Image (cartoon, grey):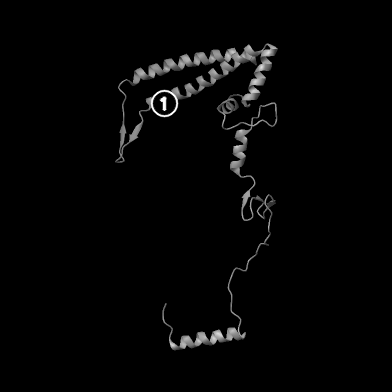
Amino acid sequence: MAKMDKDDLKYVIGRSRKLFEGEELPKVHGYEGEVEELVIRQPGEVWTDKDGKEWKQVGSNSKVRTETIMDTVRKSLREAPNCPKKLCTVDPTKNLDKRMLAMKGMCFDCVQEYEQKLKEAGTYEAYEKKTMLENEKSFLTETRIRLVESKEHITKDSDFLNEDGSFERWNLPNKEELLNELESDLKELDDRLEKVDSELLEFC
């Protein structure tokens, strides 16, 4: 800290005496905008702030948002929309629940109950056949997309970027043979897809 000279020291001492004797009030600079009223909330209390966001008091000095976007996403991932019971939720720790949700839109327990009713009604075989055809169609459709992408990739002789920034084009020596095999696979796949679609018509 720099040393004060005699004049500065006299000024500080004189100012201090005036402040102690009440002759001069100290100037205070600070924020003069709108100040929110301090509210002491109890744990568990829910309220909405001036921006329309809902909060929940979880402790004496801590608060959390009641529902964020991620909360909504997590909730939707646990919901089973096709379950006959409205309160059914998917247990994320159970692989069977997650698998049935993706396939049927139901939890595993509801799928079992539904299939048992079909067996008792004598319609389970038709349901099983339709399910297998739908699964096969889904697999064939995904496979076709990959085959078409492979065909486009082979046809256009893609350029590859090297570390030094230059481009290098790779020419496949057996390109025509590969394209012929892809065409043959695509035709076989399209024929099977057409047959699966015709077999699924009887269940419409």
The percent coordinates of residue 100 (x first, y second) are: 59, 25
Front position in the image: 130 or 108: 108
* Residue 202 in sight: no
Q: Quadrant of residue 4?
A: bottom left
- For the N terminus, the image quarter is bottom left
* Residue 196 in sight: yes
- For the C terminus, the image quarter is top right
Q: Is residue 63 above or below residue 95?
A: below
The residue at the point 39 percent across, 16 percent down is 181
Count residues near mark 1 (Cα–Cα under 10 Å), then give few for <14, some for 14-19, many for 20+.
few
Front position in the image: 55 or 142: 55
Q: Quadrant of residue 68?
A: top right
The percent coordinates of residue 73 (x first, y second) are: 60, 38
The percent coordinates of residue 115 (x first, y second) are: 65, 18
Mark 1: which amino acid? Glu
Question: How many badges with numbers are in the image?
Answer: 1
Q: Which residue is mark 1?
A: 152
Q: Secondary structure at mark 1?
A: helix
Q: Is residue 51 above or below residue 103?
A: below
The percent coordinates of residue 50 (x first, y second) are: 67, 55
The residue at the point 70 percent across, 28 percent down is 85
Lateral position of residue 70 relative to residue 151, left or right: right
Front position in the image: 37 or 132: 37
